[in-house]
Amino acid sequence: CRALMDEVEYDVTKARQKTTKVGSFRINPDGTQERRKTPLAHSEVFLTDLLDQVCERMNHYQLEEDSVTREKKFKRFAPRKGDRMYKEFKKFHFYSDAYRPLKFACEAIIEEHEDEIFSLIAQEAHDLADKLCSEKADLCGTSANLAELL
């Protein structure tokens, strides 16, 4: 859940700087169209595309265990597009199905909590991972563990 929301928050933050035209393509009798600019991050098309594609990026995460607490969590190891190392990283090909359970968990979370995700983005909430995973969906509370999510 946290990996999913980290990816969503990253893309939404980038999209908040951009706008898109929305409205009707219908032409009024006076020859005008009702079109307005809106932040791209609030566009239904953008959000739908984002949620359709975000789980593909779960192969950028790996399961790590904290050496002290023995707590296991997924952590991003791949650089993001625009990072200095990104071009070098893209030269390597990773052939592993190890991320598939994380991808399936991501898809299940989106399917079950899509409305809550849209709502948090519309509210321009910060710390989306905490808001969805701990508060709204209770996926990262004390009762949830990795086996339940996968």
Image (cartoon, grey):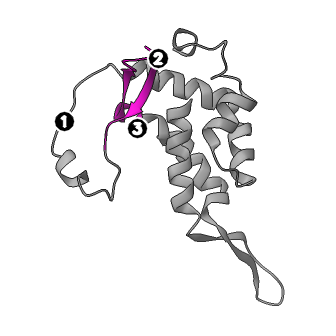
Q: Residue 71: which numbered mark, if any?
A: 2
Q: Which region of the structure is painted magenta?
A: 57-78
Q: Which of marks 2 and 1 is nearer the N terminus?
A: 2
Label 2: state its secondary structure. Answer: loop
What kind of residue is marked 3?
Answer: Arg
Farthest residue, direction right: 29
Question: Depth check: 117 or 111 in front?
Answer: 117
Q: Is residue 100 magenta?
A: no
Left or right relative to 54: residue 48: right
Report the Cα–Cα distance between label 3 and label 2.
23 Å
Label 3: state its secondary structure. Answer: helix
Label 1: state its secondary structure. Answer: loop
Q: Residue 93: which numbered mark, if any?
A: 1
Q: How crowded is mark 2: few (under 14 residues within 10 Å), some or many (20 or more)?
A: few
**Which quadrant would residue 57 be assigned to in this image?**
top left
Residue 52 spot, x, y in % from top left: 53, 40
Q: Residue 57: which numbered mark, if any?
A: 3
Report the Cα–Cα distance between label 3 and label 1.
14 Å
> Measured along the vertical axis of the image, is residue 1 above or below residue 128?
above
